[in-house]
Image (cartoon, helix red, strand yellow):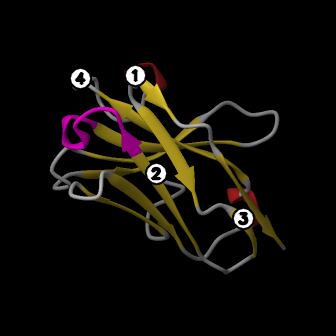
Amino acid sequence: QVQLVESGGGWVQAGGSLRLSCALSGRTFNSYIMAWFRQAPGKEREFVGGINRSGGTIVYADSAKGRFTISRDNAENTVYLQMNSLKPEDTAVYYCAAQESTMGYVLRQGYNYWGQGTQVTVSS
């Protein structure tokens, strides 16, 4: 059974940085497209960014472009989300997700496995 465990969330002032990590266990990590989503209170879960199996293709939501960086280490079975220049509107629970197929990056329905989420709070 695949398990995803996120870490690295916390509280930060606007303009600060955080690095989230997500470790996959139970299956071969490089079999999966990986992505980060986030969900703010009262809002739907939204795509932040995704990375293909080799790490050679990365896709970002407009809200993340220029500020967030996704990377993966297939030897460590881990995907990362480096978040810089954080804004209060980035406050949300951040989830990592793993996709077995090739349904694209953006749709939640394309992902087979989800982590439990990690809270990111950005104060103004």
Q: Nearer the viewer, residue 105 or 8?
A: 8
Residues packed near mark 1 inside 10 Å, few (<14), some (14 to 19) or many (20 plus): few
Query: Mark 1 to mark 3: distance in Å?
Result: 26 Å
Q: Quadrant of the C terminus?
A: bottom right
Q: Which numbered disc covers residue 10?
A: 3
Does residue 62 appear to the left or right of 123 in the view shown? Answer: left
**Cβ atoms at labels 1 and 4 below 8 Å apart:** yes
Query: Mark 1 to mark 4: distance in Å?
Result: 9 Å
Q: Name the residue carrying label 4.
A: 101
* Amino acid beneath label 4: Ser
* Amino acid beneath label 3: Gly
Q: Name the residue carrying label 1.
A: 112
The answer to which of marks 2 and 3 sits earlier in the sequence is 3
Does residue 48 appear to the left or right of 40 in the view shown? Answer: left
The answer to which of marks 3 and 4 sits earlier in the sequence is 3
Q: Quadrant of residue 32?
A: top left
The answer to which of marks 1 and 3 sits earlier in the sequence is 3
